[in-house]
Structures are given as structure tokens and as C-alpha cells.
Image (cartoon, rainbow, N blue to C red):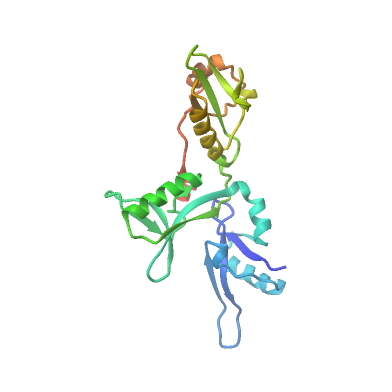
Amino acid sequence: MEKYVIFREDKSKIGVYLFVKKFVPKRWFRREKIEYCASADQAELFADNDVMAKVCDRIKKDFPNAEIICDDFRSFTTKMAKHRFWVIGRWRDDSTEEFFCGSDQNSKPCYSTDMNEVRFSLSETSTNETLQSIRKSTRDRVYSRVMFLSLENELLSPCMMITCTSKGSGVTKYFAREEGKRLRLVLTSEAAAKFDYETVLSMYEYLRIHNKNFSYAVLPVFKDNVSAKNIEAYMRANKVSRMIVMDLQLKFLNRK
């Protein structure tokens, strides 16, 4: 079976998984050569175990503390399903690939080939919004891409819930499910429906449009089982923030 050789540079730090783009083994009068890339689309597939061993040895020469994985893409992506993040890439005129790392003081997008500078987004929706904004304001050849980090993306797990406040009585309860055209509401956070970030956005919009008897709020899942009567008090006492981290940079995660 053909496999990709996938690695991160330093297994002691949070890092991005890269691929071997090209490997040329050592021959008479020819030096060994290896190239790396950020996407399986550009990566080389290897079927020979001996060649893969040489590739791994070469990676170890370049990055002595590397974590190396030899796997097919479906198996790798299945194992790493909760490690997905999104980036915005740009092709330069010399075909070099670089990635969005923020904006300058004039709101002009900036790019880098240094993965420590790249902004890894936790949300595909947020990434696409930024992508469209860049396309409207520049002529950059940009696109979005999934990358994998040695860190779980918390927004891909059931981390959010919805509260429903009756516009008539003012009573707040947690959303559990929809039964026909009626909402099933519950009194405790433990019994509330839990959603990942993308799903909770869709459900919030659906409820807001289709059931106007309530006002809605999206909250993070609580560590404790909290009564609907005590939501505000609990959030104040435990300093629960409604703010969500939408992107990250490795240079800050690995800073000591």
C-alpha cells in the first residue's frame, strides 16, 4: 500500500504535520535530496519500505526530535479528525506557497512561510469569511486548506449549548431538542443538547427564524451541572466567558 511520510518537526512542542513532497536518494555523483510541503496534494506517495526508511532517516537528520508517521491519507485523517484547523494560503508568482498570518496597520493581509507565524483557524466558517474579505480587497490568489496540528480543536467537539428565554414569561431554560414544531426545554445544563461550533451556529439561526416565541443565547458547556435559574450567577462566580478563541499561532502556544 502506498503511504505518505508525515511528520512534525519537534515532538516536544505543539506543531503542524507536514508531508514529504519529494525525495531523491543518494546515487553516484548525486546527493540525497528532500523537499517538504504542507499538503498531501503536493506530497509524494511511497510504496517501498526501504525508501520510506531512508526518507525517515533523512527527516531525522533535518529534525532530530521529529515525530514521523507513515500512513495512507484516509487512515491519517480519520485518526486526526479532531486535530483539523483551517488556514488561508496564497500562491506567489514564483509558485511559492505561503499562508495568512494577520494584517498590517493598514489592514493589508500578510503572509509567511514560517508555520510559527501562520494563523490556524478553529472554524471553517470563520476562515471562509476571512477568505472572502481578502478576495474583495486584494488580487491575491488565495484559498482555504485544512491542516493538522498536534493539538485537538476544541470547537470540533460538543462544546456549546443554547438557552431559550420565553418572550412572554421571561423564564430561561436549556434547549434539548425539537419535537415537531415545539421545543423540548430542560432545567439543567447536564440535560441540554451539546453542539460543536459549526452546528450550534446553524441551530441558533434555525431556532431564531422558525420559533420566534423565544430569544436565544449560545453558551459554552459548563463543567458543572447548573440549574437554568442559576446561569448568570454561575457564570459570574466561575468567570465563564462567552468569548471564543477563533484562531491561534504556534509561536504563542510554544512560548515558555
Q: Is residue 74 left or right of residue 161?
A: right
At 62% from the left and 28% from the top, the residue drawn is 193
Q: Which percent across, then down, holds residue 24?
A: 58, 78
At 45% from the left and 49% from the top, the residue drawn is 128
Q: Which percent across, then down, holds residue 12?
A: 58, 52
Q: Where does the N terminus fall, quadrant-wise? A: bottom right
Establish if 249 lies above or below 29. above
Establish if 190 lies above or below 120. above
Q: Which percent across, then down, holds residue 119?
A: 44, 50
Q: Is residue 110 left or right of residue 191?
A: left
Q: Is residue 88 left or right of residue 199?
A: left
Residue farthest bottom in this picture: 29
At 59% from the left and 48% from the top, the residue drawn is 83
Count of residue discs: 0
Q: Is there any visible trace of residue 81 in the rendered image?
A: yes
Q: Is there any visible trace of residue 62 in the rendered image?
A: no
Residue farthest left in this picture: 106
Q: Which percent across, then down, holds residue 47?
A: 69, 72
Q: Quadrant of residue 158?
A: top right
At 47% from the left and 16% from the top, the residue drawn is 167
